[in-house]
Image (cartoon, coloured by chain):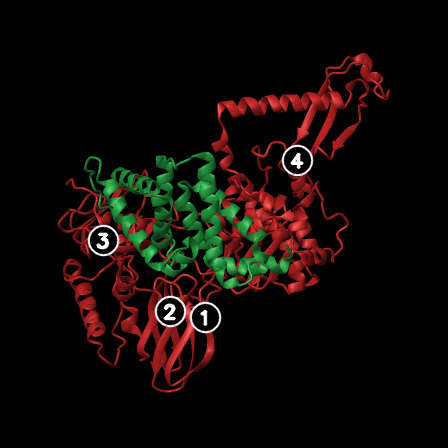
Chain colours: A red, B green
Amino acid sequence: MEKSFTQQDIEKFLSNFRNLTNPYKIEKVHQLLNNPHAKAKYSVKLNYKPFNFIIMTSAFILGLSALIIWSNPKKANIDEMSTSKKSGVVTEVVVDSNFSSKRTTDLNKPIVDNPTIKTKVTPKSEVLTKVTTDSYFPQELTTDLNQPKIENPTIKTEVAPKNDNNNPVQSVTDNDQKVYNPLPEYNTESCVWSPDTIVDKKKLVLELSDKELKTIGIARKGLATFYHNIIAGQYDMALTSHPDLIPDEERITTFNKFFVAYTTNSQFEPDGSGNFYSSMDTLIPVAINNQAGQIFWFTPHESFFNLLPERYSYLRTTYKNLICLKKIFPKRTFTNYLETGAERILDPINVLNLNKEELQKIGVQINDECVLFQTINKKYTLKICKHGTYSVGNDEDSNVFPPNPYPVIMTDTLGRRLYIEGSIVNKDTVSKILNILVPVRIYLNNIVPPNKEVLICWYYPTQEFLNALPDKIGAALKSELNRIINGSKGYSTSCNYFEVCKSSLTLNNFKLYPNPAIYSVTIEFENSEEIIGSISIVNMAGLKLRELLPNTTLLSGQNSYKLDLSGINPGLYLISVNTKKGFKTQRLIVSQ
Amino acid sequence: MDTQNKIEFITLYEPVHNQLSKFCRAISGNSEDGEDLLQDTILNSLEGFNKIKDKKVFKSYLFSVASNLQKMKLRRLKFKAKFNDTEINQIVDFGQNQEYLTDFKIVYEKMLSLPERMAEALILYHISDLSLEEIQKIQGGSLSGVKLRLKRGREKLLSLLNTKEQMKVALMLITF
């Protein structure tokens, strides 16, 4: 079908652009503020023109010649390193190694007749960066950092951790960042802990006071949290915002350096992408106590343990053992982190499990290569294929909501990695239909990489969709929908699918807005009598992520609370009001 | 600049970060230049932060700095955004079909070829989600002027798009 562009296409373009995930992380801004020299300089490439290049090269050669003449090679002292403050360059004069052997014996002589000279010029900016990095870090922090007296805070030669055979593990050289030494060979016998050991990571989270946090380089000022790598002597947030920069080999050997490898929320969900879960065994979680409840994950470097208070002295042995296990079994997990720590306050969201034939009836076809989503009229198609090529067919009716049956939202099993169907991005529509969307589990075995194999598709429950489901499920869903739509009182335990139906607490005029929410959400309701209750945000598994409003008296009459959502990863969650008389739950989308 | 000022700056800046970065991203044509512009904006604003007497105008101040820097760059380099498929892929996310990517590219290019203030108003209103009053503060002039610019911008964009041969429209909605 061919037609010209319409106003609607422009709207779609703008809306698509508006909804794109923010490519620039706020951590980068923090980093920039603390170290303006960290600014990326992409625009330089725009200036490159052949003519400019010739001028620049000539200027460089002239400058170089001037420097060589100025440094007077005939009287060059072999060990001399002259620094020019005016020109802002460091000139290093080195005698060529090919210089005749006769003369090398006379190296102590101050004057060399005619040595071949190599000049190494360090650009000004580089020199400045090295010198001034600290000055951009909050002064108060840098002074406090010296409190636990470290003899030489700018240690460059780190003590490499030793393996059990007392051989130091070779660390990465500065000159060749890309070359990583293979892991030394280990045998199971050298580990004190057995491979069956499972550690509850929740119990290892370090709770430090503000003063103790400062000793390891973390300072909090209002809403902002600063991190200063006290060993490397520079601001190191870049590493935390780019965990992907740590190559696979380095993920296992990160204990060779001292830095924050990842930041997560209190539920150990990483802020960015990256292979956090495969590295977390050997990383040390430190609770930051900020509003977002963040956790900084430090590498278990020797110097880190030295900075910790006495009560955590046992950690040295714990991590020594964990590292030992991790080296032998790099792909195994020794920490049990999610189920043990978080409190389950609600039943998990009931996700439909359909077999291949049943899925086919709702327009989902699965083969070895692809999963195909199709509307009943087969005009609208989405393919998720093995090689990552997803394609969508045209449909002239696709702007008519809802294209049915068709997934409106797609998430992972915990409601994260959220994909919203374009036509319902409108905020009003989302809040209206979110609570009655029906989740269906779809296995993408062999199609996508491991850990991403389960996709939850959320369908709008139209008559067609409900009829296409197995009879029993379809009937149950219809009955629950009737209850919700008719607003029948006396919610019963017979509800199995929709949380709104399951809710046992009656609160009039219950409103949750904005939905999708970004930084905060406002909750409003009318209460018939005064009662003590709390409000929490819960994930799809029913685990409490955070208590947004601790136990408080919910007044009789109108109640309104603005709840802070900072630190909650984008995804689909439940907001639950819990009282002694029951609970009320509604779904909420947190977007970026 | 002392720590206190930096903290005040970042406190005021954080809520605006998303809007500003989308603006920089959209107006500069590609993500690298967008990041460059964002960083320049932050550093420049930080420098002049003490001069702002009423911190309520901070938001419009930030956007004005970004807008001026971009204009300055365009004047200096006579550069109009160029795109490649990778760039477009970054914006609309992977998974889009080729047809839609082509359409997206065409609309984007045409939008940036609009007169500067017109394109800016469109981006500020539709992509960065700023209110009309906020745009008025940034661009100057009257409120009705902003409204008119938006209306004419959309109309002009449409006419620019339909001057060439009719394009096949890929009504691709999923942002997968």
Determine whether the residue tagged by mark 1 lies in a helix, strand or loop. strand
On residue A124, the disc is 4
Question: How crowded is the residue under tag 1: few (<14 C-alpha within 10 Å), some, or many (20+)?
Answer: some
Which amino acid does the dot numbered 1 rest on?
A: Leu
Residue drawn at 31 percent across, 43 percent down: B95
Q: Name which of mark 3 and mark 1 comes first in the sequence.
A: 3
Q: Which residue is mark 3?
A: A355
Closest to the camera, between mark 3 and mark 1, is: 1
Position of residue A165 measured from the top left corner of the image (x, y, whole percent):
67, 41
On residue A575, the disc is 2
- Is A490 placed left or right of A158 in the picture? left
Which amino acid does the dot numbered 2 rest on?
A: Ile
Q: Name which of mark 4 and mark 3 comes first in the sequence.
A: 4
Q: Are marks 4 and 2 on the same chain?
A: yes
Question: Residues under labels 3 and 1: Cα distance?
Answer: 38 Å
Q: Which residue is mark 1?
A: A548
Closest to the camera, between mark 4 and mark 2, is: 4
Q: Name which of mark 4 and mark 1 comes first in the sequence.
A: 4
Position of residue A370 measured from the top left corner of the image (x, y, whole percent):
26, 42
Question: Residues under labels 4 and 2: Cα distance?
Answer: 54 Å
Question: How crowded is the residue under tag 4: few (<14 C-alpha within 10 Å), some, or many (20+)?
Answer: few
Which amino acid does the dot numbered 3 rest on?
A: Asn
Circles 1 and 2, Cβ within 8 Å, touching? The answer is yes
Question: Residues under labels 2 and 3: Cα distance?
Answer: 31 Å
Q: Name which of mark 1 and mark 2 comes first in the sequence.
A: 1
Q: Name which of mark 4 and mark 2 comes first in the sequence.
A: 4
Position of residue A103 measured from the top left corner of the image (x, y, whole percent):
82, 14
